[in-house]
Amino acid sequence: QQPVQSPQAVILREGEDAVINCSSSKALYSVHWYRQKHGEAPVFLMILLKGGEQKGHEKISASFNEKKQQSSLYLTASQLSYSGTYFCGTEIGDSGNTPLVFGKGTRLSVIA
Amino acid sequence: DTEVTQTPKHLVMGMTNKKSLKCEQHMGHRAMYWYKQKAKKPPELMFVYSYEKLSINESVPSRFSPECPNSSLLNLHLHALQPEDSALYLCASSLSQGTEHYEQYFGPGTRLTVT
């Protein structure tokens, strides 16, 4: 049930873009995205519900392809503050009344 | 106030000790969660309380015993732990759990070491 994230790690220079993918073998009801900096708690970024919607704020956005059971997180014009580990969490099924299961994470490092 | 607090920050305990972790939120959230996180791994769900009732137990060993005394507080009682239980224990809360989908707010965690 654990979603698969790719890539496992990525290094960017400031100002570059990145895409992090999250895919599931099960039908998804929702996808949650969190960022965790070293030694800190995970911080919520956004939720996407089935329906193929896209969300975003500032330079971070995400899409959800219900048919492909995939979500992608887009980071544009990356800043040093974007460094951290990004986790997607998925709820499976039709109603989403299942616990959130996190992927293994993508470690993003932004360098000057 | 969008903060989840956890105490203690660090805890070292022997395998025969009994200790408790505490979590508190004052956001009016009715769902509270305990997660376990090993280094370089994702958080793994342990327990969910919804409206102060245990709604999910992810087959956690009985040496971990959760308690929700009221809607703002969540405890995790620890007894006879094993060295492999050493991890970061995260508490989280959300508006509710189930058919509504709300973001989870995480506390800073308790770093537990079992010797």
Image (spheres, coloured by chain):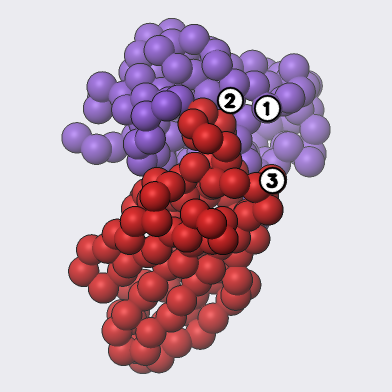
Residue positioned 35% across, 14% down in the render? B71
Residue ID for mark 1: B58
Dot 1 alpha-carbon crowd within 10 angstroms: few under 14, some 14 to 19, many 20 or more: few
Q: Chain of mark 1?
A: B
Q: Which of the numbered marks, if any, corresponds to residue B72?
A: none
Q: CA distance from mark 3 to mark 1?
A: 14 Å
Q: Which of the numbered marks, if any, corresponds to residue A1?
A: 3
Residue A74 visible somewhere in the drawing: yes
Query: In the image shown, does B77 or B12 lie closer to the viewer?
Result: B77
Residue A41 visible somewhere in the drawing: no
Q: CA distance from mark 2 to mark 3?
A: 18 Å
Q: Secondary structure at mark 3?
A: loop
Residue ID for mark 2: B47
Q: Amino acid at mark 1?
A: Glu
Q: Chain of mark 2?
A: B
Dot 3 alpha-carbon crowd within 10 angstroms: few under 14, some 14 to 19, many 20 or more: few
B19 up-or-down from A38: above or below: above
Q: In this rendering, would A108 be left or right of A4?
A: left
The colour with which the image depicts chain A is: red
Residue B39: x and y in percent read 65, 56
Q: Amino acid at mark 2?
A: Phe
Q: Are labels 3 and 1 on one chain? A: no
Q: Are labels 2 and 3 on one chain? A: no
Residue A33: x and y in percent read 43, 55
Residue positioned 62% across, 41% down in the render? B44
Q: Are marks 1 and 2 in contact (CB under 8 Å)?
A: yes
B81 up-or-down from B37: above or below: above
